[in-house]
Amino acid sequence: MFQPYELFVGLRYTRAKRRNHFISFISLVSILGVALGVTALITVTSVMNGFEKEMRERIIGASSHATVTGLGPPIEDWQSIASIATDHPEVIGAAPYVEGQVMLVHAGRSTGALVRGVLPDQESQVSELAEKLEQVDSLEEALQPGEFGIVLGADLASYLGAIAGDRVMVITPEASVTPMGFVPRIKRFTVTGVFRFGMFQFDRNLAVMHAKDSAKLLKMGEGFTGVRLKLADTGRAPLVASDLRQELGFNNYVSDWTQQNANYFLAVKMEKTMMFIILSMIVAVAAFNIISTLVMLVQDKQSDIAILRTQGASPSSVLMIFIVQGTLIGVVGTVAGLIGGISLASNIDVVVPFIEQFTGPVLNPEVYYIDEMPSDLRQSDVIKVGLMSFGLSLLATLYPAWRASRTDPAQALAYE
């Protein structure tokens, strides 16, 4: 006889007979429920991972890994700060910047923007701005000192209706005192290019100009707002920032990208946790279906259980028979879900555009900061979801199997 016989009998019970088609249908529903839950869980987790990864890459590419700002007047000797910072083994680049809030006006439209003054020959050490330029070949060509050129974010330029060669009016919040009273300081800049990071926060709100031009505009003389740093490992930014605070003293404030964008990543982490919990309930509901399936099967197989007991089967053997059947349902559902989830998460870039043909854009860049659905499938998440699904399925079999093992042969065969 097939050994172990508990496995043989358990597998036989999974096949439908004339009397228990309904039970087999419930088993199929349970398998589909587990598969659907696992597929949804892997897909959503991968999308949330991709969203977090994409946000991090775009934020780091547009801003900086760490920033040193002066707590007093503008920094004039930025080279000394950069020298101290680059002496740290994990700092691989440094560049000064000037920053301030302005109002941009063009063609009857106005909007607030963050203006950032940079040194074109130094900027490539700390950001990817030069790689994101459009309508111009290089940052050095677009930003010449004294020419008052300005490079706009793509969405900002689109809102203002400005293209390369147009002149935009830049208004600073500081006013100048004249015989006519307080008058806002206004300067016309020529649009020399457009950049596109693919993140609405920067493409809509950031304008870049030469540091000398921005210093004149903001009346900072020869000074800078601070120094931006690039690190070898962005994950160690908080530790590096802590080291630099001690080296640079109390006259400078050092922050890193995790502090500057903490709200974004905390929100993503909370959403990912909540989505995991909510979608895990789908798997839990499917596990409850396994309980109902096995309870009905135990009731249907009372006489079979009694006969097995009279032939010498122990309660533990009966217990194992029904654990085998419940576990098989869980394993088949989990494996099907893993295959479906991995396939869907790996092809999300094909599935989403197909859905958008019927529903329109899925992501609004003004809300989600990105305009395409990302996916980052991680082996650790697949293993975690698979083990959770299998564990819930195995747990769901225990009570019905225990009831089957407690069956009294005499009572079960009394009316046969």
Image (cartoon, helix red, strand yellow):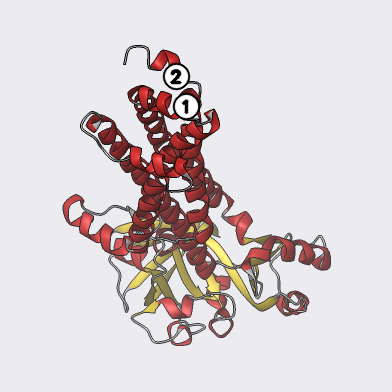
Q: Residue at x 39, y 30 (%)?
A: 294
Q: Is residue 173 left or right of residue 287?
A: right
> What's under tag 1, amino acid-wise?
Arg
Q: Is residue 140 left or right of residue 204?
A: right
x and y percent of residue 117 in the render? 54, 72
Question: Is residue 314 or residue 376 the one in the foreground?
Answer: 314
x and y percent of residue 372 in the render? 34, 61
- The outermost residue toward the left is 358
Q: Quadrant of residue 189?
A: bottom left
> What's under tag 2, amino acid-wise?
Pro
Which element is circle 2 on? helix
Q: Is residue 302 above or below residue 354?
A: above
Q: Is residue 43 left or right of residue 352?
A: right
x and y percent of residue 54 in the render? 46, 62
Label 1 belongs to which residue?
A: 309
Q: Can residue 372 be seen at all in this image of the molecule?
A: no
Q: Is residue 280 above or below residue 167?
A: above
Separation of marks 2 and 1 at Cα, in angstroms: 7 Å
Q: Dots 2 and 1: beta carbons under 8 Å?
A: yes
Q: Residue at x 36, y 63 (%)?
A: 346
Q: Is residue 332 above or below residue 244?
A: above
Q: Can residue 238 be seen at all in this image of the molecule?
A: yes
Within 10 Å of disc 2 (Cα), the crowding (few <14, some 14-19, many 20+) is some
x and y percent of residue 216 in the render? 56, 72
Q: Quadrant of residue 151?
A: bottom left
Question: Is residue 372 or residue 299 the one in the foreground?
Answer: 299
Which element is circle 1 on? helix
Label 2 belongs to which residue?
A: 409
Q: Residue at x 34, y 55 (%)?
A: 340
